[in-house]
Image (cartoon, rainbow, N blue to C red):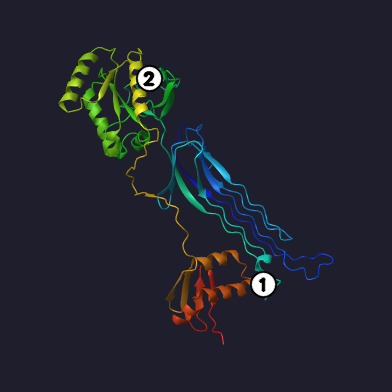
Amino acid sequence: MFLDKAKIYVKGGDGGDGIISFRRELYVPEGGPAGGDGGKGGDLIFRVDEGLRTLIDFRYQKHFKAPRGERGKTKGMHGASAEDMIVRVPPGTIVVDDDTREVIADLTRNGQEVVVGKGGRGGRGNMRFATSRNPAPHLSEKGEEGQERWIVLELKVMADVGLVGFPSVGKSTLLSVVSAAQPKIGAYHFTTITPNLGVVDVGEGRSFVMADLPGLIEGAHEGVGLGHEFLRHVERTRIIVHVVDMAATEERDPYDDWLKINEELRLYSAKLEERPQIIAANKMDMPGADEHLERFKENLRRDGYEQIEIFPISAVARQGVQELLYRAADLLDQIPEAPLVEEVADVTERKVYTFEKEDDDTAFTIRRENDLFIIECIGIERMLKRMNMNSYDGLLRFGQAIRKSGIEAALREKGAKDGHMVQIGDFEFEFVEQE
C-alpha cells in the first residue's frame, strides 16, 4: 500500500522534576539542601531513511512521544536526561505544522534530521535555591513540558525521471521493461493509482530512478480524477518523459492529449512548464501510428515546439527504448543533482517556518477588566507552571519575581487596590498593598 499523506501528533519529552532533599548524614550537622535537578526530556527527531518509500507506518501509529527526563536525586545528583526519539521518514517528506500551515522542514537527503518536538528542561532541586537568607529552602521546580503539536507529513516521490501522460498510454509497461519494477498493468483507466519506482540501468555505470506516476485527466489541477494526489509527485522529478499513445487506440488525438497534460502541469505550477521534457511516442508498432506521428511533428513545428525531442518507441516490443534511456541519462548529467523543490499553491497559504530567537520572557502587558487585572508575561507564566505554589517558599519566590519584574509597580499605576483580583495564566491572587 502506498501512503503519501499523514497527520500525526508529536511531543517532546517532559523534563524531570527537581526534588527537595536534605543531607542527613552522621557527623554532618546542618547538612543543608541536597535536592538534585531533573534531567532534560528527549527531543523528537525525524530522520530521513532512504530505504523507506511510503508513509504507511504513520497509518497505524499516529502519536509519538519522546521519553521524559529522570527525576532529580538526593545528595545533589542530577537525574539522567532522556534519549532522543528518532522517527524514520522517507526522502521527499515535507513536514508542515497543522495549525499555522508553516513548512517546518523539507527532508530530501539520506540522514537529514529535524527536531519537530523539543524536549523540556529539567526542574531545579532545592539546593539551587539556597541563599544566605534562606539556607534551607523547601522549594523545587517541576520539569518543563515538552513541545507538542499536530503536524502533517506530505510525501513527494524522489525520482530523476517522471513518466506522465493520460491513463493507459503505456507508462507502467515502459517502467516494467526498463527496470525490475513490477507495476500493475491492465487494459482499463487508472490501473496505476499509486506511484511506482524503478531503478533503470543504462549501462556504462550510469543509472537513475524512474517513477511511473498515476494517469492524468483534464481538470487534474483542480483535483479531478487523481488530481493533486498525482501532481504533488511531479514536482520532484528532474526530467519529465511525456508518454503519448501515438496509435490513438482510444480514438483521442495524440497532439491534443499532449497539450492537455502540459496545460494541467502549467496550471498546477508554472515552473513545471520549464522542466526538461522528452516525448515518448509509444505504441509505434500499431497500425496508423506513423501517420499520427507525422501530424504530431507538424503540429509541434506549427505551434513553436520544434525544440522538444521525440523518441518513437514501442514499450511492448521494446523498440527504441534504449535510445530514450540514453537521452534521459545525458540530460540528467546536465542538471544539478539537488532536488527541484517548488512552491505550490495550496488551499491555505503556507509560510516557511523559521527558527527565531525566543521572545523576551521579562516583557509583560497588563489589561483591566472591571476589578480584574490580567497580566501576560512569558517568564512569570513559565515559572508558575514549574513552581509548587502550595508552599510558603514558592509563594515567597513568586512575590519576589513580581516585584523584581516591575509588575507590582505597574499594577499600582493601573489603579490596583486592596481586594482587586490579579490573574496570570491560570493562577489568580488578591492584590494586597504593603504597609
Q: Nearer the viewer, mark 1 or mark 2?
A: 1
Q: Which amino acid, by three-letter code, is at mark 2?
A: Thr
Q: Residue furthest left?
A: 302
* Type of amino acid under label 1: Thr
Q: Is residue 315 visible?
A: no
- Which numbered circle lies on residue 131? 1
The front one of 51 and 245 is: 51
**Where, quadrant-wise, is the C terminus in this rendering?**
bottom right
In this rendering, the count of numbered labels is: 2
Q: Which residue is mark 2?
A: 173
Where does the image place residue 335, in percent across and percent down from the top left? 35, 31
**Residue 132 horizontal/vertical position (percent):** 68, 74
Q: Residue at horizontal 35%, vertical 37%?
A: 228
Q: Residue furthest right?
A: 27
In the picture, measured across the screen, residue 433 lies left or right of residue 323, that is right
Q: Secondary structure at mark 1?
A: loop
Kindly report the distance in space between the C-alpha atoms of the residues bearing marks 1 and 2. Answer: 78 Å
Task: Determine if residue 49 is in view.
Answer: yes
Which corner quadrant of the image does residue 290 belong to? top left
Image location of residue 178, percent across then percent down? 40, 19
